[in-house]
Every structure is written in structure tokens, then in C-alpha cells.
């Protein structure tokens, strides 16, 4: 019998993936390919490339041990065509196969590339998610607004996580009023579990250094988990050591505590090393044992079965034009300081520095520091989105684009967010220790030393008055702006324009 090819991509590294479940070990050939195209269509962070390639090599070894025939292309193989469709065509010729079983890629770009490939490719839905496409579409149908909170309740009911029969455990769906305390000293968690690279990982690190060493970000020290066993150890460590305080400091930012009480499991869940339900189950078990308070367990589970599932639902529901939407017509070029050159804004500088070191920044750094700046300054959302896709180890377009284009840049016309996530420097000052030691003064609103977030905040509201002033949730902000005397408003706008002119000229700001 002629064999079929079974495509496994670098973010599909689990034995339960749909393509493997539909394949026949005795005759089909698994195709896995390290290719330059996937590493360079945006300049991915070297740590992210290393994570994916190391995890791919280890997963291929596991499949072979389990009796699968695996055709694995290493990046340096001389025959490697350096693209996914190219490798499928090459392997099809090699094995005399014309049929391919694939699991739906997490990016429209690659879905299109598979559709255009001159082979008979069957694309199966990715079953690693709680809500299937049809289920999300049915939930979305006929609703005026697609709000996460209601979708989340459906996911709680479906999974039974933290449920008391039909009611939410503790009598509430959401315990966020107990969460989100400002940053304070005395954080007693030293961060996620770290792993010393073994020989497989070291070989990948050397290759990534050679091939992608010019990309933004530090390759070493490399400490990510690269197989399922290590990822499970990292999860257990987080649940024991950090989850109890996860909710309290979820939105806090401290320059010397880059990870606070965050899990750092998103890269592992997104590439298949951890299953989202097993992660939630671990949190629920710890709560049932009395080791974790309800606000922490519920808050954490909500991020995964609520936000993560919802973002994925939106991406496929909205379709291929979603990542390029630009609802506010922003077109400013991404400043060089996003790639590590100097900026005097300490909050931005710290968030970018940490991104370079770890290929990680937590949610509020992404949303209220870099994302907030990009939105206030009117940066082109497509450029912003490409930056996020490149620099974070957990970034794949299905989850990155809704978070960036939708939630952070308000460029999707308000599908995800009911109002833009914008703030002046006051929010950053309340939630972080960044403002101490900054070149700018957060308390200064105009003139010499004024915090750019203070200036740009009003500039943003003013230039989008037509679009946003009718939004009931923005009413207070516009009333405050309108109450300022006219001379002051003019000064704020002139100072903001001067700041933007310096930004455009490439001056250090
Ligand atoms: P924790 O804070 O410990 O949260 C636990 C888990 O919840 C995460 O591991 C993640 O799986 C899930 N989660 C939490 N929030 C979200 C969310 N908004 N969307 C999806 N999952 C969520 N997450 C990605 O996985 N990939 C991305 O490319 C990505 N880009 C983002 C861009 C912006 C502008 C913003 C504001 C958020 C983005 N997020 C993204 C969501 C969130 O920032 C990360 O999931 C989180 O920081 C991962 O770190 P953690 O594992 O320590 O998360
Ligand atoms: C991100 C990435 C990188 C850097 N390299 C590879 C690779 O060499 N081979 C591969 O199969 N997948 C890689 N990936 C992940 C893909 O880009 C990812 O599957 C798509 O973007 C869809 O989510
Ligand atoms: Fe950021 Fe303004 Fe604070 Fe400086 S003063 S760290 S620019 S918020």
C-alpha cells in the first residue's frame, strides 16, 4: 500500500495531535521539517527558534521510539528546500506518496500555503482546544458583542472546572476584585523552573547561533523546557511555588522581578508540550487540596479556558483579513527602540530589555507598556503585530493577532475590546516601580520632563474624538479633557506633537 505523509509542525508536538490520530503507524510516514522560511518570515527571537527546533528533535525521537517512521529534515541538510510545502513535495517524491494528512496550522499564511501545494492535503481541525470552530461560531452567531466573560462561562460549564453542579464554585464566576494588587517589595518567588541544556539542545543552540544569530534577542542562557516531561515539571513547580499568589500580583511590574508569580507555560502549551486541560486540572487540584486560594485558581483557569480559547475562536471566526485590520488608520513606523536601541522611557526600556533576554514579558507589560505606547503613538498595527509575533516565545498568529491587533491596538473595530486599553503614566506608576529613576517625571503633565504617556494619552483621545467620544465607557475621559482650559489643552497637544516629531526623526526619546 502506498504510504501517506503525516505533517507535524513545530507547534504541534503531541501524540494526540489530530493528524497522528488519523494516521496508520504501519504504513504512513511522519514528516517534520526544520526550515529557514518559518524562522525568518518574521525575524523570530533566537530563543524561540531554539525552543521549537529542540522540542521538534526530541519529539521526533519519541515518535521513532514509539514505532513511527519519521522523515525529519534538519535545517543544515543539503537537500532541505527550506519551506514546509517544499519539504512535503520532496518527501512525497521520495516515498511515492501523493496524500498528506495535516493538522490545521495556527496561521492563515501556512493554511494558504498548504492549500496551494500541488499534493492532496487533508487538513484536520486541531483538537487541542476546548471549543471547536463550529462551537465558537454557534456561540458567536446573532450576538451583538462577543465578550469573553460570557464565552468563559460556557467553557466552565463544558469542562466542569471549578463547578458546583450548575453553579460556579464559591458562588461567583470571576474573583478578579481580589486580584491585581499594585507592585510591592517582598516578592518571594525566584521565577520559573529552569533546565540545563542537554546535548540535543546544545547542538540546536550552536546551529541557531550560526543561522539566526543576527535576530533580536539573547540565545543564551537558554533554560526552557524542551520536552513533555520537563514541561510537566515546570508546571508542577509553578503550581506549588507561585500559583497561590498568582492573582494578587498578576498585573504588577517590578524591574528586578521579571516573572513575578506568572506561570511561563504559554510557550509549552502553544507548541503542544502541555495540554491546556491538564494545566487547568493541576490548578483545580491544588485549590481542592486547600493549597491555593479560589481567586488564584479561578483567575488562572480563566486565562486558559477563557481568554486563550476566546482569542483562538475570534481568529478563525473573523478570518484571514483579521491580522491586517487597521480600524484607527494608524501608520507610524515602529521605532528602533522596539529592537533594543536607546529610549529614555524606563518602562519601555525595561519591557524591551526583558523581551530580549527572555523572549518573554507578562501580560501587563505587553498590554500597558509596549502596547499602550504603540497605540497612543499611532504605530502601524501590522508592524506592531509582526514585532510581537517575532519576539515572544509563545507567539503564534492565532493567539498573537487577536491579542495585538484586537485587544492591544483596537484595530479590529472593537470586536474584542469594548474600549481601547490606553492609560497615562499614572497607571504604570501605580502598578510598577519603573517610574522611579526614569528620565521623565510621571507627575509632570506638560513641558520639560513630562512623561510621554501623559502627553500622548490626551493626544490619542483628541485625534480619535469622532470615533471614540460616543463610546459610553470613554465618556469620563472626554469630560475630563473638555474641562481643561483651552490653553492647557493646546500646550498638551503641542508637546505631544513635538514628542512625535522627535520620534519620527529618530531622536532618542
Ligand atoms: P500567565 O500570566 O501565568 O497566564 C496563564 C496562561 O493563561 C498563559 O500561559 C496563557 O496560556 C493563558 N493566557 C493568559 N492571557 C491570555 C491571553 N490574553 N490570550 C491567550 N492566552 C492567555 N499569549 C500567547 O500565548 N501568545 C502570544 O503571542 C501573546 N501575545 C500577546 C500580546 C499582547 C499585546 C498581549 C496583551 C497579550 C498577549 N498574550 C499572548 C497573552 C499573555 O500575555 C500571555 O499568554 C502570557 O503573558 C503568557 O505568560 P504566562 O504563561 O506566564 O502567563
Ligand atoms: C515558529 C516556527 C519556527 C521558528 N520554525 C519552524 C520550523 O522550522 N518547522 C516547523 O514545522 N515549524 C516551525 N515554526 C512553527 C510554525 O511557524 C507554525 O507552525 C506556524 O506559524 C503556524 O502556527
Ligand atoms: Fe514610563 Fe512615564 Fe513612568 Fe517614565 S515616567 S517609566 S515614561 S510611565
Image (cartoon, grey):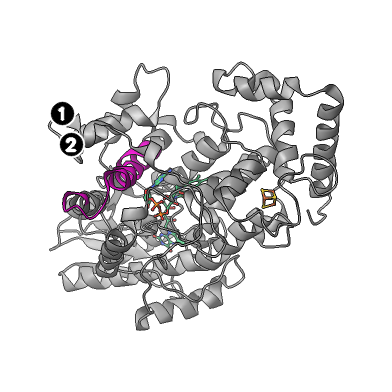
Is the Cβ of the residue at disc 1 closer than 8 Å to that at disc 2? yes
Q: Is residue 124 visible?
A: no
Which of 497/207 is in front? 497
Which of 289/63 is in front? 289
| Residue 219 locus on image (x, y percent) | 52, 73
| Residue, disc 2 | 163
Residue 293 is covered by the magenta coloring: yes
| Residue 80 locus on image (x, y percent) | 44, 69
Question: Which residue sits at x=42%, y=21%?
Answer: 145
| Residue, disc 1 | 166
Q: Secondary structure at mark 1?
A: loop
Q: Secondary structure at mark 2?
A: strand
Question: Which residue sits at x=72%, y=44%?
Answer: 443
Q: CA distance from mark 1 to mark 2?
A: 7 Å
Q: Left or right: 484 with respect to 269? A: right
| Residue 480 locus on image (x, y percent) | 69, 24
Amino acid at each position: 500500500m502506498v504510504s501517506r505523509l503525516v505533517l507535524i509542525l513545530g507547534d504541534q508536538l503531541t501524540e494526540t495531535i489530530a493528524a497522528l490520530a488519523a494516521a496508520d503507524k504501519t504504513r504512513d510516514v511522519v514528516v517534520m521539517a526544520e526550515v529557514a522560511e518559518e524562522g525568518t518570515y518574521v525575524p523570530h527571537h533566537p530563543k524561540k527558534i531554539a525552543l521549537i527546533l529542540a522540542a521538534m528533535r526530541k519529539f521526533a525521537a519519541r515518535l521513532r521510539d514509539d514505532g513511527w517512521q519519521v522523515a525529519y529534515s534538519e535545517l543544515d541538510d543539503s537537500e532541505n528546500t527550506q519551506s514546509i510545502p517544499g519539504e512535503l513535495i520532496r518527501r512525497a517524491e521520495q516515498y511515492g506518496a501523493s496524500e498528506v494528512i495535516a493538522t490545521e496550522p495556527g496561521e492563515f499564511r501556512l493554511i494558504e500555503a498548504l492549500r496551494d501545494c500541488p499534493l492532496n492535503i487533508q487538513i484536520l481541525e486541531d483538537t487541542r482546544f476546548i471549543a471547536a470552530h463550529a462551537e465558537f461560531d454557534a456561540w458567536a452567531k446573532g450576538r451583538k458583542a462577543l465578550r469573553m466573560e460570557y464565552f468563559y462561562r460556557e467553557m466552565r460549564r463544558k469542562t466542569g472546572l471549578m463547578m458546583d453542579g450548575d453553579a460556579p464554585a464559591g458562588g461567583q464566576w470571576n474573583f478578579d476584585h481580589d486580584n491585581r494588587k499594585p507592585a510591592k517589595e517582598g516578592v518571594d518567588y525566584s521565577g520559573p523552573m529552569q533546565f540545563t541544556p542537554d546535548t540535543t539542545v546544545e547542538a540546536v543552540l550552536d546551529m541557531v547561533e550560526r543561522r539566526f544569530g543576527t535576530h533580536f534577542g539573547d540565545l543564551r542562557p537558554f533554560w526552557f523546557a524542551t520536552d513533555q516531561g520537563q514541561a510537566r515539571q515546570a508546571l508542577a513547580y509553578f503550581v506549588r511555588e507561585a500559583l497561590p499568589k498568582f492573582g494578587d500580583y498578576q498585573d504588577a511590574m517590578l524591574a528586578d522581578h521579571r516573572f513575578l508569580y506568572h506561570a511561563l507555560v504559554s510557550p509549552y502549551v502553544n507548541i503542544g508540550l502541555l495540554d491546556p486541560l491538564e494545566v487547568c486540572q493541576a490548578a483545580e487540584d491544588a485549590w481542592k487540596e486547600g493549597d491555593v486560594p479560589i481567586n488564584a485558581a479561578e483567575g488562572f483557569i480563566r486565562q486558559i479556558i477563557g481568554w486563550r480559547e476566546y482569542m483562538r475562536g475570534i481568529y478563525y471566526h473573523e478570518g484571514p483579513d483579521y491580522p491586517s485590520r487597521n480600524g484607527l488608520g494608524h501608520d507610524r513606523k515602529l521605532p528602533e527602540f522596539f529592537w533594543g536601541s536607546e529610549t529614555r522611557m524606563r518602562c519601555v526600556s525595561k519591557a524591551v530589555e526583558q523581551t530580549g533576554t527572555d523572549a518573554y514579558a507578562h501580560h501587563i507589560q505587553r498590554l500597558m507598556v509596549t502596547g499602550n505606547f504603540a497605540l497612543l503613538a499611532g504605530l502601524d498595527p501590522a508592524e506592531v503585530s509582526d514585532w510581537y509575533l517575532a519576539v515572544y516565545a509563545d507567539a503564534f498568529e492565532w493567539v498573537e493577532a487577536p491579542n495585538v491587533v484586537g485587544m492591544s491596538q483596537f484595530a479590529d473595530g472593537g470586536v474584542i475590546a469594548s474600549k481601547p486599553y490606553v492609560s497615562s503614566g499614572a497607571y504604570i506608576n501605580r502598578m510598577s516601580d519603573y517610574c522611579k529613576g526614569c528620565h521623565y517625571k510621571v507627575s509632570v503633565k506638560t513641558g520639560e520632563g513630562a512623561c510621554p504617556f501623559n502627553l500622548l494619552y490626551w493626544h490619542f483621545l483628541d485625534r480619535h474624538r469622532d470615533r471614540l467620544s460616543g463610546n459610553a465607557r470613554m465618556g469620563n475621559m472626554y469630560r475630563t479633557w473638555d474641562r481643561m482650559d483651552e490653553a492647557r489643552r493646546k500646550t498638551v497637544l503641542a508637546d505631544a506633537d513635538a514628542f512625535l516629531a522627535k520620534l519620527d526623526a529618530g531622536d532618542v526619546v
